[in-house]
Structure formats: C-alpha cells, structure tokens
Amino acid sequence: MKKFLIVGLGNIGEKYDDTRHNIGFKLLDNLAGNENVSFESDKLGAVTSFRFKGRTFVLLKPSTFMNLSGKAVKYWMTKEKIPLENVLVICDDLNIPFGTIRLKAKGSAGGHNGLKDIQDKLQTQQYPRFRFGVSDAFSKGRQVDYVLGKWTKDEQSQLIERLEKGAELIKSFGTAGLRNTMNNFNGQ
C-alpha cells in the first residue's frame, strides 16, 4: 500500500480563514469534503486520510502556524513512515497569476516562510510542492496585508473550479506520479 502525505500550509484561527495565505488549508478542506472525510485534531495538526486507487492519502493541516510548518511535516512523515518523494506541500505563490497551479519536484523556498521552515527541518529542498498562484496585485510594501487578506468576490467565484482542479492534481500525484502530473497540470 503506497502512502502519501499531503500538507496544506496555512495559519490556524478564524481570522485567517479565507485568506490567500491559507490556500493550502482550503484545498485540503475541499478534497476532504469530496472524499467525505473529516479532519481530527491530532499532534501538531488536523489530520484525515482516505483511500483512492489502492493509495492512502494522509491530509495534514499543521497547527504550528505557517512559519513553523516543518516540525509538523517531519513528525507526520516519521509517524506514517512516508518517504520524502511521497510528500506534497501546498502553498500560495505571489509570483504566479491568480488560480494558476504549478507542481515542482524541488526548489528554493522563494521567500515563503512555511517552505523555508520545512526545508530547514527536513534539511533538503528536494521535496515536491504544489504552488497555487495568488498573484502580486498589491502595492509596494503591502505584501503581508495582501497574503493575509480575504479573497475578492471575483476570486471567490473562480476558486470553486480551481479547488476542484487542485483536488484532481493531488490525486494524480499519488496515482500517476510527479512527472505525469506536472505535464498534465502545470500552467492550468
């Protein structure tokens, strides 16, 4: 039985719900809803799992806050005995147009503090990540306000389809593999 750890990055607490920075949580909530599973609070995060085509997908929403996500990722990788290549980290990306999805096999943190902490705790940049574009539609010096800001009405209306596309990408990652999924989904 192949197992995959899917980590959605975000911040816990009501004030962060529906913010751009919490797209990782939002994507996992959507996928869990599609699979009729519910998150339970556990050590260092909210966790659930489901089976699909002979694979087990463990979904994790770290409760450590974005900038300390690495501790939760490392803990759940060890607990569930999931190898690094079967881990997928989902985060927001300011350098990609809104709603565009990009899957990468590895890479730098690119200024993302959640990725920076994961890289630090795992001692490598060699882990798959799913970047969801939130665009860079903010004025100089307003980056923090923008990523911690709520989605616009226009963005919210487009999110429904984008969340479904994200769920397809996650399941493809576990069943078709990283390369095939990159070829089929990147840029969409």
Image (cartoon, rainbow, N blue to C red):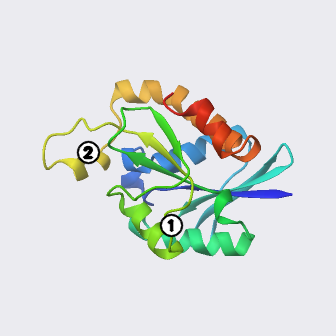
Q: Residue at x 44, y 32 (%)?
A: 99
What label does residue 12 carry, if any?
none
Can residue 43 be spotted in the picture?
A: no
| Residue at (73% x, 49% y) in the render | 37
Left or right? Give the position of 18 relative to 149. right
Mark 2: secondary structure: helix
Judge from the rendering whether residue 62 lies leftward or rightward of residue 109; answer left or right.
right
State the separation of the CA atoms marked 1 and 2: 22 Å
Residue 175's quadrant in the figure? Answer: top right
Of 50 and 133, which appears nearest the observer?
A: 133
Q: Quadrant of residue 110?
A: bottom left
**The N terminus: image quadrant:** bottom right
Q: Give the residue at x 81% y 56%.
A: 2
Mark 2 residue crowding within 10 angstroms, few (<14) / some (14–19) / many (20+): many
Local packing at callout 1 (Cα closer than 10 Å; few below 14, some 14-19, many 20+) is many
**Height in image: 87 above or below 159?**
below
Where does label 1 land, which residue?
A: 63
Q: Amino acid at mark 1?
A: Ser
Question: Residue 48's spot in the image, x, y percent?
Answer: 70, 57
SS label for mark 1: loop
Horizontal and vertical percent position of residue 78? 68, 75
Residue 161: percent from the left, percent from the top?
Answer: 54, 26
Amino acid under disc 2: Tyr
Label disc, if present, on residue 146 of the rendered structure:
2
Q: Nearer the viewer, residue 161 or 17?
A: 161
Q: How many marks?
A: 2
* Location of residue 167 in the rendering, given as x and y in whole percent from the top left corner: 63, 38
Residue farthest to the left, as pictured: 140
Residue shown at the point (36%, 57%) measured from the top left: 112
